[in-house]
Amino acid sequence: MAGGATALTRAVVWLVLASCWTIYQLPITQAIWLTLPSSGTKCVSEEIRSNVVVLADYAVITDNEHPNVIPTIAARVTSPYGNNLHHQENVTHGQFAFTTSEAGNYMACIWIDGNHQGGKGVTVSLDWRIGITAKDWESVAKKEKIEGVALELRKLEGAVQAIHENLNYLKNREAEMREVSEKTNARVAWFSIMSLGVCVAVSILQLWYLKSFFQKKKLI
């Protein structure tokens, strides 16, 4: 019985590790290509909780027909409250990195600057990494002198921690939304009651006025 229990325990542990590894392997964000119009702006937004590391690289995809002519672009990243976190102009590639100080939608906008006179759109590659995917594991391995299985376990630990923090964030957001919904329902209920009361009062005043009018005219 003891051997069977031990084997079952090991199987459960390996199943949990395999599940965590599968979750870890799923990419949170992937590199995307944006086709910028000759005049206009393309924006990408992401809802991120506070105290999360964000790292991104963007670059213009060169045209095979004109490899020596590379148009320049401009980029701006803003926080949920409109603060500028990154602003660069007249570049062909760039990078921005920051740690979020507030939760909400962070927006990155890219557009073609005035130096591009071709009149055609431009394709830009944007690689946006958040949280665990933005961590420099090579530096961690060198600093803590870990490699192989120990490094992979450390990555799994980071992935599990990130998932736990995201679940807590979603739980808090759900509680906030539920509180807002309850307050809104209470206000709508009070408004409905007040509207009904006003209607009843106006009806009573109308009946009183009509009764007084007909009495003065001696119709009743």
Image: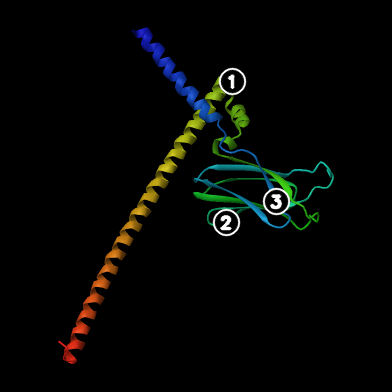
Quadrant of the snapshot with the C terminus: bottom left
Residue count near mark 2 (Cα–Cα under 10 Å), binned few <14, some 14–19, many ≥20: few
SS for callout 1? loop
Left or right: 77 in relation to 216: right
From the top left corner, tell me how far across and down residue 108 is, in percent: 62, 50
Q: Residue at x 31, y 58 (%)?
A: 186
Measure how far apart labels 1 and 2 are at the Cα level: 41 Å
User: Which residue has dot 3 on it?
Assistant: 36
Tell me the mark number nearer the camera, choosing from 2 and 3.
Answer: 3
Seen in the picture, residue 192 relative to 17 is either above or below; the reply is below
Q: CA distance from mark 2 to mark 3?
A: 24 Å
Labels 2 and 3: the sequence-earlier one: 3
The tag on residue 83 is 2
Residues 52 and 80: in front is 80
Q: Secondary structure at mark 3?
A: strand
Q: Quadrant of residue 124?
A: top right
Side of 190 where 130 appears, left or right = right
- C-alpha distance separating marks 3 and 1: 42 Å
Q: Which residue is label 1 attached to?
A: 148
